[in-house]
Image: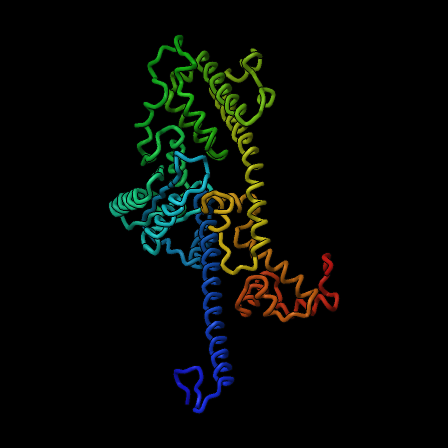
Amino acid sequence: MNIGVTDYLLKPVDAVTLMETLDKVGEIIYRERAEEESINQYKLEMEENAANSKRHFFMELCTKVLDEEYIAHKSSRLNMELKANFYNIILLKLFCAELEFAAYSEELFNAEKELFLRFANHPRYQYFDHLIIGSALLIKGNSIDELETLQEEAVERILNGVENNRGVNYFIAVGVPAASTSELIKSFNEANRALAYRHMLKPDQVVQADHLASYQHIFQSNDLILSEIDVKQLDERIVGNFIASGDKGEVSVFIDEYLKGIGESALNSYMFRQYLVIDFYFAVLRFAKKFGYNQENIEDISQDQGKMNAVIGSVPETIDYLKGLLVQAVELRDSVSTKKYRKLIEVAKAYIRENYAKEDISLKEAACIVNVSPSHFSTIFSKEEGKTFSEYLTQVRMTKAKELLRCTNRRASEIGYEVGYKDPHYFSFMFKKTQNRTPKDYRTAALTGEEKQQEEC
């Protein structure tokens, strides 16, 4: 019997037998370690896929009117416990004010990771990172009092997590309570309103949506003499900050909050609206020139009294113009960013194509190569490619695997190893999952002509 041992030898033992046995044991140990690594890699990929599905579902809850049956089914399938009497949403932006926008920071990565761990597996919190808006926290309470307590504890957890990482700034936006999942849209929208104030306030702020009125002092005073308004009195930095880092989807909320702070009496003034339009126009123009755009790229209505009169003829017309102008500014900025991001993504894709055979290739590793934070890299990669980093990596591996299945006689296990899967079972699983057939069936179809291929061997 050889219970608890891999093999046993009887004396006398010659050198050849000893070496053969050691090689055999070594191969078994190596295979077991490889299988363990493959299992761990599989778990990581499954966790990433599950996290992506949860993010998508969370954004559905916050932006769409969903059927209760659909919510129950989807939350159950994703293992998301949503049952509660009251809810609230906190939106969070982490950044490094001293660094160029989106530049890579180890401190920023560590802060994001620490916050994720601080809320992981907590029954009352559901944390969502790598969202386009930043990160979000769904809070679930059985009563309003409990919800407020959980909200305070959540903010404290976030602050403690950020304080452990020097150089990391934050902006925390707290929504309003919701009595059902169907009311999460309002909670999210109110938190998003509060988040828009990050363009108007200094970093490191906690802003509650139901306290936004207390921040109106940062805008123009309501009691100014309209005939003495000077365009320079308006804080141009607020508009400039938004143009530099705001999202197109935030334009409407930003303009509404900005004008609400200025005050209705000022906005009702024909003269003030003209000053406001000119101020916004030149703020956008200054920003555009920084990126090489000239005045022709933005329509100048300051010299055309007819167009100016049409824009400032009424408050709604002025508001529509301002929103359209900011949308244009953000689109100009994004067109520059897209070119920059396109180069960045191409570098990352080239890195994947050159290193896909490494089983431990990771999103963090790719983010380091292009010098941006992993969370930002994940966001822009998904936005630019329409798929996650993990999905693209799998696509590259499967494309190479299909080529080898068509063009060589190698065993499927060898091909799987060559494209980054040390465990042949996991390779077969991923191949069938993505190609809807086993490697053997694919090869058979390719050889018999059933699988039409445009690529040549």
Check the image and report above or below for 349 versus 407.
above
Task: Answer with left or right where residue 105 lies relative to residue 398.
Answer: left
Q: Position of residue 126 (x, y in %)?
A: 37, 51
The residue at the point 41 percent across, 15 percent down is 232
- Looking at the rendering, which quadrant does residue 420 occupy? bottom right
Q: Which sits in the foreground, 121 or 380?
A: 380
Q: Can the viewer see residue 417 in this picture?
A: yes
Marks counted in the figure total 0
Name, please, the residue furthest toward the front. Answer: 15
Q: Residue furthest top?
A: 227
179, 303: nearer the viewer: 303
Q: Is residue 5 above or below residue 433?
A: below
Q: Position of residue 185 (x, y in %)?
A: 42, 42
Position of 419 with respect to 189 (left or right) is: right
Give the quarter of the figure containing the N terminus: bottom left
The quarter holding residue 207 reads top left
The residue lying at 53 percent from left, 21 percent from top is: 285
For the residue pair 443 and 417, the one nearer the viewer reads as 417
Residue 36: percent from the left, percent from the top? 45, 68
State how the image is colored: rainbow
For the point 47% across and 55% down, which residue is it?
A: 48
Q: Residue at x 48, y 68 (%)?
A: 34
Q: Position of residue 206 (x, y in %)?
A: 31, 36
Asked whether residue 183 appears in the rendered view, the answer is no
Rendered image quadrant of residue 425: bottom right
Give the quadrant of the C terminus.
Answer: bottom right
Drawn side of residue 314 relative to residue 116, left or right: right
